[in-house]
Amino acid sequence: MKDTVRVTVWNEFLHEKRDPRVAEIYPKGIHSVIAEYLEKEYGFEVRTATLEEPEHGLTEEVLNDTDVLIWWGHLAHEKVRDDVVDRIYRRIVLEGMGLIVLHSAHYSKIFKRLMGTTCSLKWREADERERLWVVAPGHPIAEGIGDYFEIEHTEMYGEPFDIPPPDELVFISWFKGGEVFRSGCCFYRGMGKIFYFRPGHETLPIYHNPNVLRVIGNAVWWAKPVKRPKPRFGNVKPLEKL
Amino acid sequence: MKDTVRVTVWNEFLHEKRDPRVAEIYPKGIHSVIAEYLEKEYGFEVRTATLEEPEHGLTEEVLNDTDVLIWWGHLAHEKVRDDVVDRIYRRIVLEGMGLIVLHSAHYSKIFKRLMGTTCSLKWREADERERLWVVAPGHPIAEGIGDYFEIEHTEMYGEPFDIPPPDELVFISWFKGGEVFRSGCCFYRGMGKIFYFRPGHETLPIYHNPNVLRVIGNAVWWAKPVKRPKPRFGNVKPLEKL
Amino acid sequence: MKDTVRVTVWNEFLHEKRDPRVAEIYPKGIHSVIAEYLEKEYGFEVRTATLEEPEHGLTEEVLNDTDVLIWWGHLAHEKVRDDVVDRIYRRIVLEGMGLIVLHSAHYSKIFKRLMGTTCSLKWREADERERLWVVAPGHPIAEGIGDYFEIEHTEMYGEPFDIPPPDELVFISWFKGGEVFRSGCCFYRGMGKIFYFRPGHETLPIYHNPNVLRVIGNAVWWAKPVKRPKPRFGNVKPLEKL
Amino acid sequence: MKDTVRVTVWNEFLHEKRDPRVAEIYPKGIHSVIAEYLEKEYGFEVRTATLEEPEHGLTEEVLNDTDVLIWWGHLAHEKVRDDVVDRIYRRIVLEGMGLIVLHSAHYSKIFKRLMGTTCSLKWREADERERLWVVAPGHPIAEGIGDYFEIEHTEMYGEPFDIPPPDELVFISWFKGGEVFRSGCCFYRGMGKIFYFRPGHETLPIYHNPNVLRVIGNAVWWAKPVKRPKPRFGNVKPLEKL
């Protein structure tokens, strides 16, 4: 229980190279900001991986050494190789690796596959105010957070958000323009646990916000694998006399 | 609310043609037994469709005329065309068609896609006793059913059943050989509603059991589409001054 | 399934007698407006009952003839007799009567008892705008409602709302002043079903809003009792050889 | 996160004094066996409290020093003082103390109050076999447990179990006599988390079973309070311009 958690932060890492505004906020990439925080504040063992590395940096070996995978993507969801998605999927559902899906990764292949729905939503880029309200007061992912926290300038995501009803709903967002959004959603899938967390637009310093980082850190604790024998499926003999 | 419901009962319809034991129990196929019951007892408008018809009998037109689709398959899940699965999927998630998934169809393409998990389970063919217990006493799918009902001889399905936590769990099965199973499971996905119901082995007269048929009829009522405007996704303007 | 539903609309009926502003909006009381709508638009058999009638109008006989009870209260929660609350409670949990709890009735004795939590919330009377977003697109209580509907002037209720996680969450409200609220919440309790619906301040014509009324009508359909034998509890003999 | 957890194990402690068969299995009481295990195997700070101590051993001070309360009762639910129940209730719902409810404590005042239902069930004392199946493969309360574990001789509890649908369902029991039971159930209530766990009959050495003890230990980790500011309820000013 007191062991460390091995985290891999995956980032598409394209915006930061192409758009100077993004590079200014995240000179070493979004993944590096998150990784440094988790290492420093939570003491996790953290590595990073990005799209343009071989196998997107997510070899069998890397995934086998990963307890929780954090995923940021936006421009290039379709460029993620299907065999790598299969590998991630199996590691989550069959072996219990946790997955934290950030912001625009609602449209990533792995999230859509795990949800079984379109994962569509409303959106607007107007740098408006968001207020994330805690609606699960005893949930470990809300640790350290008050009734709400604010992000002053952000992209809007609005309902309907086409996901299955979350198994645990932790945050609901209010947006100045008139929308609401289920912003912090927990899902149990097979042996694995998935947390979707809305904040994170690339042109804004969302991942420098201490509340956003705190929630990601909490989610890692929540999503880490449970140590138990793999489930046994298939043809079985009776356990009792028939 | 008092309108009829248009039901399509889909059956792979292979066992009945190949195996005389199955043909004896279901001379006109599993689909016909279910269709006749739903027509007679519930007054639904029912049609049937099978694997070997063109487009598996599930053209755009047929699906557009279907409120609830009932699905039985076992031997030939892989023979169901991907474009037809896509069509069914869109009709459920985007337009609200209901889906009732029977027995071995836990491994059908459409169910696995909607669940996002492997849908694996334990199983055993030993013609043993099953007792289905109601665990949602106020649920409409349990209407007319007492604390439990029994199936004297059946195939066993056992936990773990690799599905997401059901949004509503209606039945849990007890098996003589020592296992339990979540046998009646409701899921909300997009505009649609899905009910998985376990009973139904082809070599046994499961679909002549009045309790099994009653549950399927109840599930049709529960799963029928809700009439409301289609959700709007994508880029939107603010509803309030920013 | 096509039978009518017998509805009793209960109202404290004090504001309307004491406050001319309320009397102007609801000259015959809030209960009468709701009752007339349900009778006319849905064809339900509707009666009403109020606090100052003997036994608050909720005798054994009346409750035995009630499929769904609608509850509005605000000033006088503590004046509702405990034996009448016990009677309502038993009729819901043991016999399946539905309960629709409106607005300030979040603090009614019957709702708090069924929830097991304090049912506290934030509130503000500032006649501000509310926008109720549908987050369960396939839910029958959302029938006829688009992505959202608005109430131009209303009291605010805000999170945290101290209820158990709803078994189905249908609406989330956005308020101009910056809050969100889980406004349409379904709960299964024993044989009964409960729907909490937020709108309804007495000094505003909320129950003349067609969307509000539509949702209440839909909720009656959803909450009506399921016809099945009463559960059997207590000491039982084995069903199988030990 | 790595802090210890302060646990109080409460036991009615009557059977052990009155019935020599029970005294033989639990010479120092059921509470002592659980307390010693949690101290030794998990390193928690554990104290015990019993019915006949002043204020049942549960003073304000003791509760304020308790992160998770474990509750065993059977004969004397009605002897537990209402003011002490109120105190426990407030500490859970308003301050986040965890509660683990064992076996016959399904009928304790505190559990019934938190559930809002009757908490009735079927039962039989026939020393028959129980098999607890894990149905939430990634849940931390199942850590260290395989597909199932068995208790060779135990009292039977059967469905329907009149509780709200659990927020997370971890175990389902199979009984030789033909019943099933939702045996491991998680509930979020206010700031607090509650776990109901079925095993534990007093005349049998259930609390010497390593799997049973393991689950209780896991549940303490799951149920411990989350550190965050207390929710603010009541009248509030707008956060945005109206």
Image (tube, coloured by chain):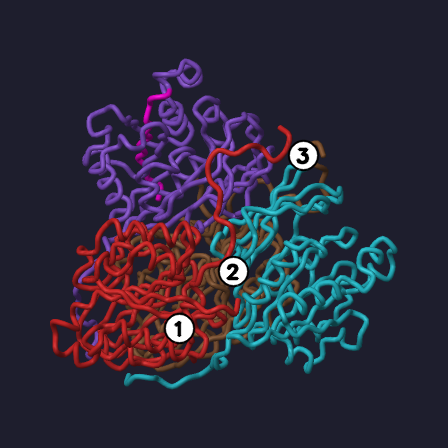
Chain colours: A red, B purple, C brown, D cyan
10 Å crowding of disc 3: few (<14), some (14-19), many (20+): few
The subunit letter for the residue under badge 2 reads D
Between D150 and C35, the one lying in front of the other is D150
10 Å crowding of disc 1: few (<14), some (14-19), many (20+): many
The residue drawn where x is 17% and y is 66% is B236
State the quadrant of the N terminus of chain C: top left
Expressed as whole percent of the image width and height from the top left, the position of residue D232 reads: 47, 81
C232 to D240, vertically: above or below: above
The amino acid pointed to by label 2 is: Pro
Instruction: Decide whether residue B14 is among the magenta residues.
Output: yes
Determine the image quadrant of residue C134: bottom left
The subunit letter for the residue under badge 3 reads C
The reply to whether dot 2 and dot 3 touch (C-beta < 8 Å) is: no
Secondary structure of the residue carrying tag 3 is loop
The residue drawn where x is 29% and y is 60% is A161
D220 to C191, vertically: above or below: below
Residue placed under numbered mark 2 in the picture: D140
The magenta region covers B1-15
Can residue C202 be seen in this snapshot? no
The amino acid pointed to by label 3 is: Leu
Expressed as whole percent of the image width and height from the top left, the position of residue B173 reads: 54, 39
Q: How far apart are the alpha carbons under marks 2 and 1?
A: 18 Å
The amino acid pointed to by label 1 is: Gly
Between B106 and D121, the one lying in front of the other is B106
As drawn, is D228 to the left or to the right of A58? right
Secondary structure of the residue carrying tag 2 is helix
Q: How far apart are the alpha carbons under marks 2 and 3?
A: 34 Å
Residue placed under numbered mark 3 in the picture: C239
For discs 2 and 3, the disc positioned in front in the rendered view: 2
Residue placed under numbered mark 1 in the picture: A217
Secondary structure of the residue carrying tag 1 is helix
